[in-house]
Amino acid sequence: MRRFTRLALGFSKKLRNLGAATALYVGHYNFCRWHRTLNRTPAMAAGLTGHPWTMSELLSEAGM
């Protein structure tokens, strides 16, 4: 994530923004992004969901 580079250089001032950006990235990585090695999303491989989520599903579950 490019955000971590900017944080390391001192551009971001709020820890809350870092937490929100990290949570969205991890959620997208696990629930929305199709992984070739697994041939599905990690959440599908773990049995948490039966289909890859859209961004609107992810954001609605996050309460945004």
Image (cartoon, rainbow, N blue to C red):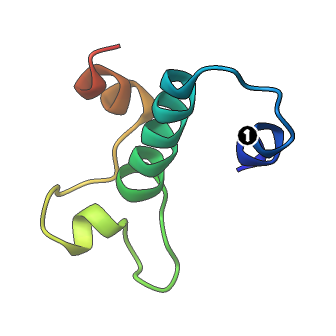
Rendered position, 39 above or below 10: below
To which residue does mark 1 refer? 3
Residue 31 pos. (x, y %): 35, 52
Quadrant placement of the C terminus: top left
Q: Amino acid at mark 1?
A: Arg
Q: Who is closer to the viewer here, 31 or 62?
A: 62
Tell me the residue at 41%/79% (across/down).
39
Rendered position, 45 above or below 4: below
Rendered position, 34 above or below 49: below
Q: Quadrant of residue 42?
A: bottom left
Judged from this view, the residue extending furthest toward the top is 64
Tell me the residue at 31%/29% (across/down).
57
Q: Who is closer to the viewer here, 29 or 53?
A: 29
The residue carrying pointer 1 sits among few (fewer than 14), some (14 to 19) or many (20 or more) residues within 10 Å by Cα, namely few
Tell me the residue at 38%/58% (across/down).
30
Residue 59 pos. (x, y %): 37, 24
Query: Relative to 3, is 56 on the left or the right?
Result: left
